[in-house]
Image (spheres, grey):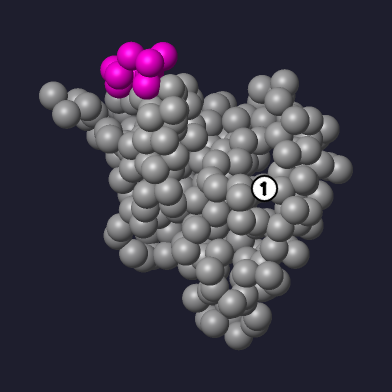
Amino acid sequence: MILSQQNSLNHIAIILDGNKRWSIKEKTSILKGYEKGLEKINLISNFAIDNKINYLTLYTLSSENIKRNTVNHIYKIIYEYFNNFLNKIIDEKKIKLKIIGERNNIPKEILNIINECEIKTSNNNTLNLNLAFNYGFKNELIYVLNQVKKNKSNIHLDINNIKKLFYLGEIPDPDLLIRTGGYQRLSNFILFNLTYSELFFTDTLWPDFTTKELKKIIFEYKKIERNYGL
């Protein structure tokens, strides 16, 4: 079968669901599940680099997750991930990191290392990796509306100017959204940017997700005749 040549793949978004259920399945701690999930980010990032996919946006931790009892332990794992990113991944892979989400209610040490990662990777261009952390679309929408209110005399309200105010800014919208873990919902994730994204859902839990399955999804994506609502 000849795949559609017009179906370029520039931006993949993934909802990383299933860390907790993976922990139960494997009879290990919830923290081990999140740790395994963070390791998987490196694998998928490498795949994106190897296949010249320019943008990868991953839903790592929602604003709802932040309210759970285990969050303080998860913060420790996240800090270690970003620390490893600073010390190894930056130089090895030349990834540009952008964090999208609220920053006013996360621990100072996490905020500091996030800021350091973003600053030190700002000139990298191998892959644009956007991690949604303490993110929720409703909160993002409130942020955008406040920006419009604050700058109403300076903003011409057309779709392009409004788009710039969202966390992803002028980054191209995702071509493909994947959700792991079996649920078929968007869970408050970058809804403004998913208008014409192709949606794929898999029962595979995120820590079990492989590049082999990602290749299969991309193969199916390439067969779609995209018409962008026309």
Q: Nearer the viewer, residue 127 or 78?
A: 78
Question: Looking at the image, which residue sits at the far left?
Answer: 230
Question: Looking at the image, which residue sits at the far bottom?
Answer: 27
Which quarter of the image is occupied by the N terminus?
Answer: top left
For image coordinates 71% across by 44% down, the residue present is: 114
Taking 212 as reference, is 85 left or right?
right
Q: Nearer the viewer, residue 76 or 5?
A: 76
Quarter where residue 210 is shown: bottom right
Does any portion of residue 10 appear in the rendered image? no
Taking 180 as reference, is 102 left or right?
right
- Locate residue 89, reporting x and y percent: 78, 40
Which quarter of the image is occupied by the C terminus?
Answer: top left
Label 1 packing within 10 angstroms: few (<14), some (14-19), many (20+) = some
For image coordinates 30% across by 25% down, the residue present is: 4
- Numbered disc 1: secondary structure: helix
For image coordinates 75% across by 30% down, the residue present is: 119
List the residue tagged with mark 1: 42
Taking 156 as reference, is 216 left or right?
right
Under mark 1, the amino acid is Asn
Does any portion of residue 98 appear in the rendered image? yes
Quarter where residue 45 is shown: top right
- Locate residue 101, reporting x and y percent: 53, 46
For image coordinates 37% across by 41% down, the residue present is: 141
- Locate residue 95, reporting x and y percent: 69, 32
Magenta residues span 152-161
Q: Is residue 89 magenta?
A: no
- Locate residue 106, reporting x and y percent: 65, 56
Quarter where residue 159 is shown: top left
